[in-house]
Amino acid sequence: QVQLVESGGGLVQPGASLRLSCLSSGDTFSNYYVAWFRQAPGKEREFVAAINKNSFNLYYADSVRGRFTISRNNAENKGFLQMNSVKPEDTALYYCAATSKWDVSNWYDNLRTYNYWGQGTQVTVSS
């Protein structure tokens, strides 16, 4: 019921900052939990960060904790991923995802939890 479109990716140098955006439409954004996943060439899609409906609960993969920040603005129907101190290993196609619920069988870091996905935005970190 909700459509997602990512933007903000690009080519940046190691140590730089980048902010990804996820614009939603088609349904009330505040009804959805949101997550970011990424997929590098030859690798599985992996969890990056997740946020609940009111921004009270934030979750991060160990690989990005302390460097990335997930946030959302429900009034603007947007989710964000602020990426600081980026590394070459952060290079990947980044996806925004959404679901109407989390539970013990469909938790925040599970690919299968999310039934709505954006098209992805490419982030390349290289000198």
Image: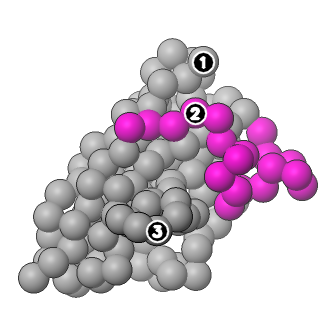
Of the numbered discs 1 and 3, the one sitting upstream in the chain is 1
Q: Secondary structure at mark 1?
A: loop
The reply to whether residue 67 is in sight is yes
**Dot 3, how many residues are within 10 Å of its Cα: few (below 14), some (14-19), or many (20+)?**
few
**Dot 2, how many residues are within 10 Å of its Cα: few (below 14), some (14-19), or many (20+)?**
some
**Dot 1, how many residues are within 10 Å of its Cα: few (below 14), some (14-19), or many (20+)?**
few
Residue 121 image position (x, y, % from top left): 30, 48
Of the numbered discs 3 and 2, the one sitting upstream in the chain is 3
First to last magenta residue range: 101-119
Q: CA distance from mark 1 to mark 3?
A: 29 Å
Residue 116 image position (x, y, % from top left): 58, 33
Residue 87 image position (x, y, % from top left): 29, 82
Q: CA distance from mark 2 to mark 1?
A: 8 Å
Q: Is residue 18 magenta?
A: no
What residue does disc 1 label?
A: 1
Tag 2 and tag 1, C-beta contact below 8 Å? yes
What residue does disc 3 label?
A: 43
Q: Quadrant of residue 47?
A: bottom right
The reply to whether residue 70 is in sight is no
Q: Amino acid at mark 3?
A: Lys
Q: In what quadrant of the picture does the N terminus appear?
A: top right
Tag 1 and tag 3, C-beta contact below 8 Å? no
Considering every residue shown, the one lying at the far right of the view is 104
Q: Secondary structure at mark 2?
A: strand
**Front-most of residues 34 and 42:** 42
Residue 40 image position (x, y, % from top left): 38, 66
Q: CA distance from mark 3 to mark 2?
A: 21 Å
Left or right of 26? Residue 17 is left
**Front-most of residues 14 and 17:** 14
